[in-house]
Image: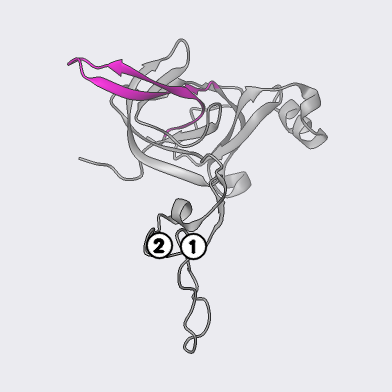
Amino acid sequence: MQKAILARKLGMTQIFNDVGRLVPVTVVQAGPNVVVQKKTIDNDGYNAVQVGFIDIKQQRANKPQNGHYSKAGLSPKKYLREFRLDDIDSLNVGDEIKADIFAAGEKVDISGISKGKGFAGTVKRWGTHRGPMSHGSGYHRGVGAMSGCSSPGRVMKGKKLPGHMGVEKVTVQNLTVVKVDSEKGVMLIKGGVPGPKNGLLVIKNPVKSRK
């Protein structure tokens, strides 16, 4: 069954597993998510649920947002996302989706917005080679050859150039859920996940399963 939940990255730590091996984990606050709206094939042409995460004051939401949440009888949320699920019959407006939908040992895909690095050169942004550092070379971390002098005589599409780095959607696949604390709504994920502390994460079933 398809499962999905909105979460918040709290930071990283490390724990010992059952055999005494040290495992780096990311701590995430998974839910509770509240179902704000159900979309059905009859009304909308597809099945989906809208879920909200983290309460905010009514003054921080605009008039259309407040109207959308008040129609569902809920307080405004900081984040609102839509998940297309195969079975939405068991979910109703106002129901909560908690961290216990996942269990220890499961594989998940986690998406988030990567950390911003500002304006970066080609060496940092794309991992290109630098120029010689000796023999009088004055070209160390530049872009490199841009185009031929005669043919084609232009910069080719896809050329690795300096520019804004980070703040992009990144998905890490097949991460392992190490532990789930349903009372606190906390999940421990093996390894690192995208984004800064307190960044929004989307945790879903894995698209690719590893045997």
Residue at 49 percent across and 85 percent down: it is: 149
Marks 2 & 1, CB-CB < 8 Å contact:
yes
Q: In which quarter of the view is residue 79 placed?
A: top right
Residue at 75 percent across and 21 percent down: it is: 57
Asked whether 127 or 78 is in front, the reply is 127
Asked whether 77 or 24 is in front, the reply is 24
Please state the horizontal and vertical placement of residue 195, each as a whole percent of the image: 50, 35
Asked whether 48 or 116 is in front, the reply is 116
How many neighbours does mark 2 have within 10 angstroms: few (below 14), some (14-19), or many (20 or more)?
some
Q: Say left or right for 115 vs 17.
A: right
Please state the horizontal and vertical placement of residue 184, each as a whole percent of the image: 47, 11
Q: Residue 50's mark?
A: none
Q: Would you say residue 88 is visible in this rendering?
A: no
Residue at 61 percent across and 22 percent down: it is: 94
Q: Say left or right for 173 vs 40.
A: left
Badge 1 marks a residue whose secondary structure is: loop
Q: Quadrant of the N terminus?
A: top left
Tell me the residue that label 2 is attached to.
131
Residue at 55 percent across and 44 percent down: it is: 117
By secondary structure, the bulk of the magenta-drawn segment is best described as strand
Q: Is residue 186 magenta?
A: no
Q: What is the spatial separation of the Cα atoms under label 2 and label 1, in whole angstroms?
A: 8 Å
- Magenta region: which residues? 3-32
Asked whether 12 or 128 is in front, the reply is 128
Q: Earlier in the sequence, mark 2 or mark 1?
A: 2
Q: Label 1 is placed on what type of residue?
A: Gly
Tell me the residue that label 1 is attached to.
142
